[in-house]
Image (cartoon, rainbow, N blue to C red):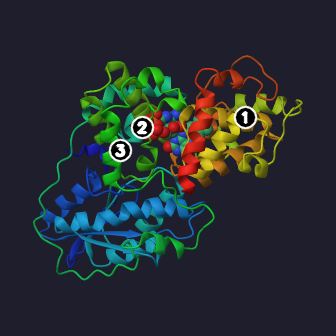
Amino acid sequence: MIQASRIKILKDGPENPEGAYVLYWMGLSQRAVFNPALEYAVDEANDRKLPLVVCYGIAEGFPEVNARHWTFLLQGMAEIGPALAKRGIGFVARREGGPVGTALHYAADAATVVIDRNYLKPIRAFYDDFVARAPCRVVQVEGDVVVPVETASPKHDYAARTLRPKVYRLWEEYLHPLRPRPVHHRATAIKLESTLDLDDVAKTVAGLKCDQGVGPVKRFTGGHAEAERRLKHYLGGPFAHYATIRGKPEAGAASHMSPYLHFGQISPVAMALAVRAARTGDSDDRAAYLEELVVRRELAMNHVYYQPDYATLDAVPEWCRKTLDQHRGDPRPHRYSRKQFEAGETHDRYWNASMQEMRETGYMHNHMRMYWGKKIVQWSASPEEAWDIAIGLNNKYFIDGRDANSFTNVGWLFGLHDRPWGTQPVYGTVRSMGEAGLKKFDADGYVREVARLAAAERD
Ligand SMILES: Cc1cc2nc3c(=O)[nH]c(=O)nc-3n(C[C@H](O)[C@H](O)[C@H](O)COP(=O)(O)OP(=O)(O)OC[C@H]3O[C@@H](n4cnc5c(N)ncnc54)[C@H](O)[C@@H]3O)c2cc1C
């Protein structure tokens, strides 16, 4: 089922009567399964008695995307062509031309075009460029949130507590399975020449213009199949007690699904349905997980959609900037540069371990992300420098970096979506996080676990 509010006509005609196929330009929803834009495009193709072609154009040179990110993304992309071929859908992946150039190239022979949806500004600029130049009708189909952002709320929400009731009111309408449609006209006769080699991802990534210094990790392999495997394993055991132990990084109760969500390799609706149907865990575990997956994640989408300055410190509320400014002269017993942070050379071995986990394995547990980030605020020369360091390292090393969640959660370090707390040096009334935050779990166990994970990367 594809809800009408997921569908937006971005360019209303003309249709190309000579069009040889319907085109789906794949952007964020990088999967052949449970993909509303793909299934909508199948309907469009069947209605016109045409085959369907799916294209993907790599955004080589995209800011901050490095060999780690490309490897994960292309591992997922490599599964898509064969999965679509089984259904008679054509697939082409190109290196030259970039995303918009590729889409325009294939749009020239298309009757109509379908695209998916990303709420981040640079990608929205791609859509605007494409729609302005597309020769035919363009329809956008949202597939990577449960409740489409404007449907959930017409404005920037102040906090999770203001968005939550709106999402709860609507989400039943969106939590439905999506069945694959039969494809009536096969794309076998259409000549499609991929120029992005997906048979040897490592070789392709080695040839890309990007930071090769941040390499792939063994801890995570990209792709829908791996996302499903992980989710199944997770819901079969580690999910039990999520409500009570999700704050303990060493307890193994987190799902590690954020990299797959970030690259659209799994649908959040499919995940939410699987969580509801899970036989492990109880209603508190399900509610706690859906709070993170739906309310918190979609609060981040709300933030980047309605706050144009989301990539800078200007995005946090005025009270936060004011209090941080009033305390910018406070003594800082510890002060580190970006280089020292990045190398994990602080006086705090727990913090250094979190940096090592991020740098060497591409992931960090939510509780440690909070500690990691709050300490950067405390130990940097100024709020502005802290912002640049936190968002810079976040987006460089996390596989799930450069996400709506990245900008919003880094914003949270500076008071976004939060309220004023008691005054503390440096933070002012922005919530601080002290070493007490490490006493709530087995922090030494966490350091040992990071050492084990880092050693496994080097093996
Ligand atoms: C400083 C800081 C930086 C962060 N940077 C990122 C980032 O770059 N990319 C990213 O995806 N998340 C980020 N987060 C949010 C959160 O930490 C991660 O989404 C989560 O740790 C991912 O691990 P998981 O999938 O095992 O989480 P689980 O606990 O298993 O949660 C399931 C899913 O719920 C969502 N979720 C969980 N926690 C949050 C949260 N606090 N806000 C929004 N959604 C949430 C995620 O999609 C996650 O995959 C950051 C948090 C902080 C405090």
Earlier-in-chain disc, 1 versus 2: 2
Callout 1 crowding tier (Cα within 10 Å): few <14, some 14–19, many ≥20 = many
Residue 375's disc is 1
The residue singled out by tag 3 in the image is: 230
**Rendered-image quadrant of the N terminus:** top left
- SS at mark 3 in the image: helix
Give the spatial CA distance, label 2 vs label 3: 8 Å
Side (left or right) of 60 relative to 416: left
Is the residue indicated by label 2 positioned so its CB lies within 8 Å of ligand 1? yes
- Image coordinates for residue 216, horizontal then vertical, percent: 52, 60
Callout 2 crowding tier (Cα within 10 Å): few <14, some 14–19, many ≥20 = some
Q: In which quarter of the image is residue 419?
A: top right
Three-letter code, disc 2: Ser
- SS at mark 1 in the image: helix
Query: Is mark 2 in CB contact (under 8 Å) with mark 3?
Result: yes
- SS at mark 2 in the image: loop
Q: Which residue is drawn at 78% across and 31% down?
A: 324
Give the spatial CA distance, label 1 vs label 2: 25 Å
Three-letter code, disc 1: Lys
- Image coordinates for residue 327, horizontal then vertical, percent: 84, 29
- Image coordinates for residue 17, horizontal then vertical, percent: 20, 76
Foreground tag (1 vs 2)? 2
Side (left or right) of 438 relative to 263: right
Residue 255's disc is 2
Q: In terms of depth relative to the viewer, which is nearer, 413 or 199?
A: 199
Earlier-in-chain disc, 2 versus 3: 3
